[in-house]
Image: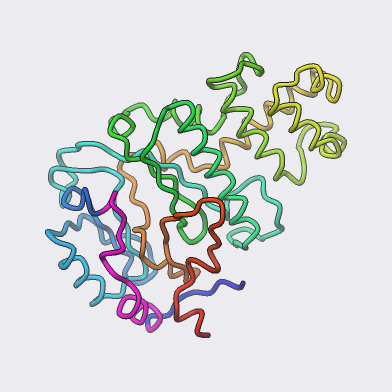
Amino acid sequence: MEFREATLQDRREYFAREWNPRDLPSFITDYFRFLEFAFDNDGTGPNDRYNAFSSLDELSSRIRKAAPYAIYSSVSHYDVPSQREGWLRAELVFDIDARDLPARRCECKAGEVCEICLEDARDVALTLIETLKESFGVSKLFLVYSGRGYHVRCTDEEAMSIRDRGSVFTFVTGSKVPSDLFMVKGYSSAFRRMSGVTLSKMRSLAMRGGSTLLENRDSIIEALTSRDKMRLEGIIKKKALESLLEELSLVNAESVDGKCTIDIKRILRLPTSLHSKVSMVCTVVKNWEKFDPVRDATPHFLKEM
């Protein structure tokens, strides 16, 4: 599918015919009065910020009247969202942009997305979710298709109270080589999981002898993820393994927007809104494994074309 930019008429049609405030997810409606809303009215960026609404009807009226280019809401909750004062808590979020993936199977040019790299972005998101469940016991997790990637949004009370999100980001994304690669659980498990996914997507390795290693990619991934130390050492020498793990840790970190996780004043695209740059609907994913953006997040005005 070829993604295209939505016109003003497209936006008016979408918000008049398809968009419904009742479709907003619970992590928006349950905390509605604590959220800051932001708008990109003409495609120049979300510079219309510090908006707060007393009801969904008020928000709906604003959206239907303006048919904005993009709509955002804060990950933080405030006592006074119109001034971003009285911080209460913030969702723990991870942003995976398919355009920026350092390891992807497609050959998209910079800034472009296709169905393949969107699938790669979803694989990264699902990997983060698995680690959040296993290592942090998180249960209130949402996967959101953002138009050109995915957001992982966590609303567990304990997770929303975390202040030091840098260390959480490092852990969940596998951004540092563990001291013991073969520990059963904990950070080593998170690193192996993320590194296996990253390596499966890479088309080249910067390290010396990278092309030879990629020829044995499947065997390396299997040995790594199954904690088969003897087999792994039989495939790759110690120095080469150290170099490979270091490169994987760097690529792991670059696969997710760390600033989005760490900065609690961030705004994210509002689920159900239109990503006008690609004419796709920002969608909360219900079936994580079978979700297809082309089938499940394409607005009617684009299907009718």
Where 179 sits versus 220, above or below?
above
Q: Is residue 44 rendered to the left or right of residue 127? A: left
Q: Is residue 276 rendered to the left or right of residue 88? A: right
Residue 188 x, y percent position in the rendering: 59, 21
Residue 276 x, y percent position in the rendering: 43, 70
Residue 153 x, y percent position in the rendering: 39, 44
Residue 61: within the magenta?
A: no
Q: Quadrant of residue 194?
A: top right
Q: Quadrant of residue 246?
A: top right
Secondary structure that dominates the magenta span: helix
Residue 14: within the magenta?
A: yes
Where 30 sits versus 212, above or below?
below
Q: Quadrant of residue 159?
A: top left
Residue under the image location 33 percent in, 60 percent down: 46
Residue under the image location 44 percent in, 49 percent down: 143
Q: Which residues are magenta?
A: 9-28
Q: Which image quadrant: the N terminus?
A: bottom right
Q: Considering depth in this image, is 126 or 239 the residue closer to the camera?
A: 126
Residue under the image location 86 percent in, 20 percent down: 234
